[in-house]
Amino acid sequence: MLYLQIRIPTDDPDIQTNRPADEQNMDDHISQPYALLLLPHPPSSSFPRLKEAYGPGLSAVFSKLSATLDGANRIALLDIALPVPGVLSPRCQPRAKIFNSLQRLLASFYKLVGVICAAANIELDGPGGVDTRVFFVDYDPTGGLSSSKQGPVIDLRTLATCGRPWEDVYTFETKTGKELAAAFSTYLRSQAGDSQLPKFSAVPGGEESIPSDDLLTTNDSQLFRHYSVAVGGTWDHLHVGHKLLLTATALAIDPLADSNQSKERLMTIGVTGDELLVNKKYAEFLESWDERWQSARSFLDAIIDFSPPETHVANIQRISNPEPNGKYVLVKVTPDLSLKFVQISDPFGPTITDPSISALVVSQETRSGGKAVNDKRAERGWPSLDVFEVDVLHSGEVAETAESTAASFESKISSTDIRRRRMDMAKGNL
């Protein structure tokens, strides 16, 4: 067995922590624009309502960030805080009760991001584009204060005091948008003082509305807490479809019910081994296994770890054992939460070698894989996994857009199309 534990300083260039500019040198900070978008609460989880409420504002923000790149071979970072009042309340525990509501909202929102960028010909995630990371914030000015230090669901104070070096904070020109900006600014000043505040800018659009009943519905039959959850994928050229699936997996893991509870929580991410991908289209532009797990890890850091930079030290273990699923990288994000990136060589991965896993996250198009996994576990006499299903991003609901826009949207959520574009760029065809 090869065992290597590394404590990595956060300015190590070989490991992406996705705590962007504060862990890079000043040149990197200048070259990579970094912004936060504070949204007013969504009126509904439906795509048409989100488009009506957020469309103009999102278009303005993405256009501004794209313009700062000016066609350069760089990527802008955009954190998007999506408020859902009451999401941290006891009635929303365990997370399984609200999983469907939150993943549906997230899917509609990422679909909106893709459609807006397709219509404006703005690249997502790749060179010259915007790397978008969406997480949830519980903020209700009329209610009590909720607290959560770990994403993808946090409170507003934690967001404001996490120490991320945003250069710009965008808010909406609505009453609720202004209230949210004021509260956030107050928290920010208490932490950083006036001299270190980012630039605040208001964008048009938004609507004054009360969230509809479908925004946060609960499934009271789901009462089991999950502390070990798995997901699998290739994760090549990480795009918004991948981000939806990874965020949903983080949502499926429950926070500890008691702050004094000593329990290890584990998110297992299966990453397809290179040897299984040789027959993929444009295989020469596939990212390596190391690049793919690091991209997934970088994104998960951005939506989970909101600890101040001075308290953040990467702790990584690289394990190589001869048994199935014996090669993996273990990343400790917080004292009680680790990410395990496992090199997989079959459709089942660690779900049939690790009996401690209690839940599996799949997309709608791979739901049959969940049944196959549970059949295999039944053969071993292991308990079945709870299977959480995530919506698929597609252009079906955006048929009213131009055909070219729908095609561009589909290309943004296809790793094959992304590799094809990389090939065209390498040949000078773009």
Image (spheres, rainbow, N blue to C red):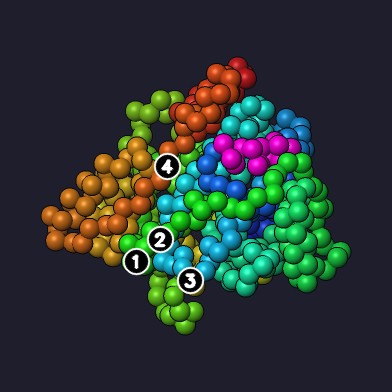
Q: Is residue 385 shown left or right of residue 392?
A: left
* Residue depicted at 42% across the width and 42% down the height: 391
| Picture coordinates of residue 234, whole percent (x, y) | 40, 41
How many angstroms separate mark 1 from mark 4 (CA)?
22 Å
Q: Quadrant of residue 81?
A: bottom right
Q: Amino acid at mark 3?
A: Pro
SS assignment at label 2: helix
SS assignment at label 3: helix
**Residue 223, disc:** 1
Q: Is residue 165 shown left or right of residue 406?
A: right
Q: Which residue is mark 3?
A: 90
| Picture coordinates of residue 60, whole percent (x, y) | 74, 37
Q: Residues within 10 Å of mark 1 (few under 14, many from 20)?
A: few
Segment colored magenta: 48-62
Q: Amino acid at mark 4?
A: Asp
How many angstroms separate mark 3 from mark 2 (CA)?
11 Å
Q: Which residue is mark 4?
A: 391
Q: Which of the pair 133/416 is nearer the observer?
A: 133
* Residue depicted at 66% across the width and 31% down the height: 122
Q: Residues within 10 Å of mark 3 (few under 14, many from 20)?
A: few
* Among the two numbered marks 2 and 1 on one chain, the one whose residue lies closer to the N terminus: 2
* Residue depicted at 49% across the width and 51% down the height: 214
